[in-house]
Image (cartoon, rainbow, N blue to C red):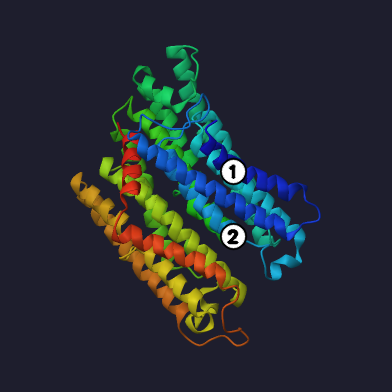
């Protein structure tokens, strides 16, 4: 195994094992998790640099019979490792009242590290069956930590998430099996028959109708995990009830991992049938997701559920982008990066707000700028980034998506998306305004606590501004290579 790939995958496993075997829980376990997450992030950056230097999507790094890190894998790995580092550094166990419950600290560290590990495996393994196993494992590991604070609502949300996503993943498995048996019946038993590279290269000899059926299963299956409507019903409950660091990982990168699997299968199917088929399905599910996400935001009364429905909307935009050719795919992948940073930051800030106000009701959070000036300001920046205002990166990716719709002569798509984005803008700004201003509730302490996490989240703001003002050449090259790996 490539050394950088080993340093990407092994640290979260090591941190999880340390949390499992150290009894009773000690504070250094949390620091081990943070250090391991930092090592994993550094390794992801090293892999991304190596991929960019390789020059083409056909020259991946860390190649073996099992593993393959190309531009798209490296891009997702950087996002996952970055958000996992934020969640680990800002999670419970490093200070504050949370240290009063060592069992809860231990549960958090074991399963969040396992969660990060399964996501990293999913985007670096080239066997589509094992990728399915890894994505199913993300369901199990994340479901175990959703009810970290044991309440009736959190346990119900965990079970709902587990059941709906397991059914969805079962459909994705059915699509995988259909494609595999078609391959075996046509090409016979060959080494690496389940590797997505082999499937893509031989897709032209497979039966188009069967591949279309397989993709429909795959899209519905992984689309359930990605939060695409109408399979999104688990998402608002799970993301709103989970601890904020876990919500950051689920909303920031777990949904993107499911979209990654869809993109891989789209490349296979498009090599055998007219891309119109996959594009039509993605466009339909994407626009439905943006519509439901947008109008759900209008009536939302809980700020964590508000962020969850925002994720439904943004994954819909990613699906729409994947259906709009190379320029749209570029916009979709850039949107994945921007969304990972903005949404993880917003959920982590929502956790600080919940800790101070002890409510998730938007109406119960007033005077935020006076109660928590820095948290309120950063939360406002996160919401402004999510609605796509300049100078933040989401403005650029959404602009490129609209441009892709116009370039491909889908003017009606551009019009619908613009109307829905305006709906999202008005809704989120109205909710944000109610939280930032107004009278402070009685009994709420004024001032910031544990201010150092705000520095880390301010760095996220810096990333969003950089991606909005100027797209660095290495990132642009990495995304462009990812596009060439998805669209042939």
In front of the other: label 1 or label 2?
2
Name the residue at 48% across, 15% down. Answer: 184
Name the residue at 71% across, 45% down. Answer: 17
Give left or right: position of 385 versus 31.
left
Q: Is residue 225 above or below residue 132?
A: below
Quarter containing the N terminus: top right
| Count of numbered labels shown in the rendering | 2
Badge 1: residue crowd in 10 Å (few <14, some 14–19, many ≥20): many
Name the spot of residue 174 as percent of width and height, x first: 52, 30
Quarter containing the C terminus: top left
Name the spot of residue 431 as percent of width and height, x first: 43, 73
Can residue 163 be seen at all in this image of the molecule?
no
Of labels 1 and 2, earlier in sequence is 2
Give left or right: position of 28 versus 392.
right
Name the spot of residue 359 as percent of width and height, x first: 60, 73
Label 1: element kind = helix
Name the spot of residue 485 as percent of width and height, x first: 35, 34
Given residues 359 and 372, the one toward you in this image is 372
Distance of label 1 from label 2 (alpha carbons): 16 Å
Q: Which residue is mark 1?
A: 117
Badge 2: residue crowd in 10 Å (few <14, some 14–19, many ≥20): many
Can residue 429 be seen at all in this image of the molecule?
yes
Name the residue at 46% across, 71% down. Answer: 379
Label 2: element kind = helix
Q: Which residue is mark 2?
A: 89
């Amino acid at each position: 195994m490539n050394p950088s790939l080993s340093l990407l995958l092994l640290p979260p496993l090591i941190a999880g094992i340390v949390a499992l075997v150290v009894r009773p829980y000690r504070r250094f376990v949390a620091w081990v998790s943070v250090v391991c997450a930092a090592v994993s992030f550094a390794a992801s950056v090293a892999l991304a640099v190596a991929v960019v230097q390789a020059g083409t999507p056909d020259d991946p790094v860390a190649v073996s019979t099992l593993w393959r890190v190309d531009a798209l894998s490296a891009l997702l790995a950087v996002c996952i490792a970055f958000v996992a580092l934020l969640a680990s550094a800002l999670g419970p166990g490093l200070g504050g009242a949370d240290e009063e419950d060592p069992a809860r600290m231990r549960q958090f560290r074991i399963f969040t590290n396992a969660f990060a590990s399964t996501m990293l495996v999913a985007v670096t393994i080239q066997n589509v069956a094992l990728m399915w196993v890894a994505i199913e494992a993300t369901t199990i590991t994340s479901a175990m930590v959703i009810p970290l604070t044991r309440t009736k609502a959190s346990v119900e949300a965990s079970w709902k998430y587990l059941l709906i996503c397991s059914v969805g993943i079962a459909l994705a498995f059915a699509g995988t099996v259909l494609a595999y048996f078609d391959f075996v019946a046509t090409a016979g038993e060959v080494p690496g028959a389940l590797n997505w590279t082999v499937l893509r290269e031989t897709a032209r000899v497979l039966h188009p109708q069967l591949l279309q059926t397989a993709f429909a299963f795959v899209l519905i299956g992984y689309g359930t995990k990605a939060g695409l409507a109408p399979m999104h019903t688990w998402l608002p409950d799970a993301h709103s009830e989970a601890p904020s660091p876990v919500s950051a990982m689920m909303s920031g990168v777990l949904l993107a991992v499911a979209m990654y699997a869809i993109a891989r299968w789209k490349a296979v199917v498009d090599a055998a049938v007219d891309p119109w088929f996959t594009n039509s399905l993605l466009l339909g599910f994407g626009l439905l997701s943006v519509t439901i996400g947008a109008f759900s935001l209008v009536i939302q009364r809980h700020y964590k559920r508000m962020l969850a429905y925002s994720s439904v909307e943004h994954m819909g935009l990613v699906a729409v982008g994947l259906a709009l050719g190379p320029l749209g795919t570029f916009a979709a992948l850039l949107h994945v990066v921007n969304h990972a940073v903005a949404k993880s930051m917003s959920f982590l800030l929502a956790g600080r707000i919940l800790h101070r106000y002890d409510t998730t009701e938007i109406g119960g959070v007033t005077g935020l700028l006076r109660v928590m000036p820095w948290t309120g300001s950063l939360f406002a920046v996160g919401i402004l980034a999510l609605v796509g205002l300049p100078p933040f990166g989401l403005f650029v990716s959404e602009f490129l998506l609209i441009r892709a719709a116009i370039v491909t002569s889908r003017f009606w798509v551009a019009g619908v998306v613009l109307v829905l984005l305006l709906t999202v803008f008005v809704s989120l700004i109205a909710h944000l305004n109610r939280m930032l201003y107004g009278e402070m509730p009685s009994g709420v302490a004024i001032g910031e606590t544990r201010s150092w996490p705000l520095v880390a989240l301010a760095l996220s703001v810096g990333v969003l501004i950089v991606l909005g003002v100027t797209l660095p050449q290495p990132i642009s090259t990495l995304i462009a290579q990812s596009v060439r790996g998805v669209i042939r």
